[in-house]
Amino acid sequence: MASVTLTGVHKKYPDGFHAVRGVDLEIADGELVVLVGPSGCGKSTTLRMIAGLEEVSAGEIRIGDRLVNEVEPGDRDIAMVFQNYALYPHMTVRQNMAFGLKMRRTPKPQIAERVATAAAMLGIEALLDRRPRELSGGQRQRVALGRAIVRDPAAFLFDEPLSNLDAKLRGETRTEIAALHHRLDATMIYVTHDQVEAMTLGQRLVLMNHGIVQQVGPPMEVYTRPANRFVATFVGSPAMNLVEGRIERGRFHAPQIGAGWDVGAREEGPAVLGVRPEDLMPAGGSAPVFATGQLTVVERLGHETLAHYRLGSTDTVCIARLPADGGGPPPETAPLTIRPAGLHLFAGDAAAVRL
Ligand code: ATP
């Protein structure tokens, strides 16, 4: 296994589109890092540059100590798992898994042993003589994983590998990839647009938007200390509630929240106040009242209830996450309060300021 290092990496496509704008990233040997962000943010382009499937326009990519900018994909010692599996349709599962090793002239007994070990690890021994068309989507993805595992590469690269699976299989395969990482202690770089996948799989997340890394950190750090407004709203479901306003003389003012909210000594000017749904409480104890909310919608999800409150007489709606057994229905009109550590403040769209 090996570390993967990106230094000042850019990608400009031939049509001039600047898809990746100066990415610096150090992925440790054995680490599972998830690149996550909305469609078009440049995460796949970044992964494809690591794989050697796209040329790097500027900057350096290293796998271990080796600069790989000019190294062919086949010589980078990486294995890639794609969304569409990319299996050879005319080959059996066994042949698909063995193909890469055969090309590298690995001795036959060693190939057989590695295929058998990987097949056992993934529970696909019974499928080894089938062809891809005789497999379900989930089974095909397992074979694609198996083909990567037998190679014993310096790093595994995953490009949205679960996108074609239904919700249940997606959850199961996700768990399996996490278990594989644990078992193989392998360097893995995983691309997804799904924040749940990112949160549950990644040891660290790399959040990207418009070709720029917005924040790098362990999932809970990204969740509890989002660096900016983009990260705050991208991670978490339902999204963080935001109220746009201004800071003046140590108070945050917005039409939605009445008298203003004490935020201490801050730079004056436009600002956005954020509260996660679990930190917004209707009629919650002695904390100062943030705003008066009118209940508009109640969503009962079984394990929890989401109560939508309109703030004051404005159109702004904030969602409060309540326990399912919260003692009766949410109040119709409620003085909304905020848990002490649950307030985020963003200056414009720049870095977050913690209160
Ligand atoms: P998705 O989840 O939709 O795949 P992504 O974050 O992985 O999104 P990329 O595939 O990396 O995004 O694409 C980043 C941007 O680069 C997009 O705006 C895309 O249209 C553009 N792009 C991708 N390939 C090319 C190309 N060959 N030529 C020009 N622009 C491209």
Image (cartoon, helix red, strand yellow):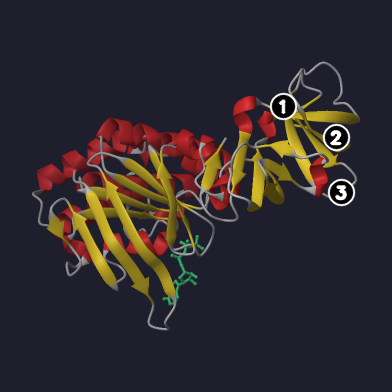
For the residue marked with disc 2, what is the amino acid?
Thr
Residue carrying label 2: 292
Indicate the quadrant containing the N terminus: top left, top right, bottom left or bottom right: top left
Label whose residue precedes the other's in the sequence (1 or 3): 1
Relative placement, left or right, of 276 versus 23 is right
Residue 258 location (% of width, % of height):
83, 41
Q: Residue 310 sits in which quadrant?
A: top right
Q: Depth-wise, is mark 1 or mark 3 nearer the camera?
A: 3
For the residues labelled 2 and 3, the Cα–Cα distance comes to 11 Å
The answer to whether the beta carbon of the residue marked 3 is less than 8 Å from any atom of ligand 1 is no
Label whose residue precedes the other's in the sequence (2 or 1): 2
Q: Residues within 10 Å of mark 2 (few under 14, many from 20)?
A: many
* Near-viewer residue (60 or 345): 345
Q: Residue at x 69, y 47 (%)?
A: 248
- Label 1: state its secondary structure: strand
Relative placement, left or right, of 130 versus 270 is left
Q: Residue 280 sits in which quadrant?
A: top right
Residue carrying label 1: 304
Residue carrying label 3: 314
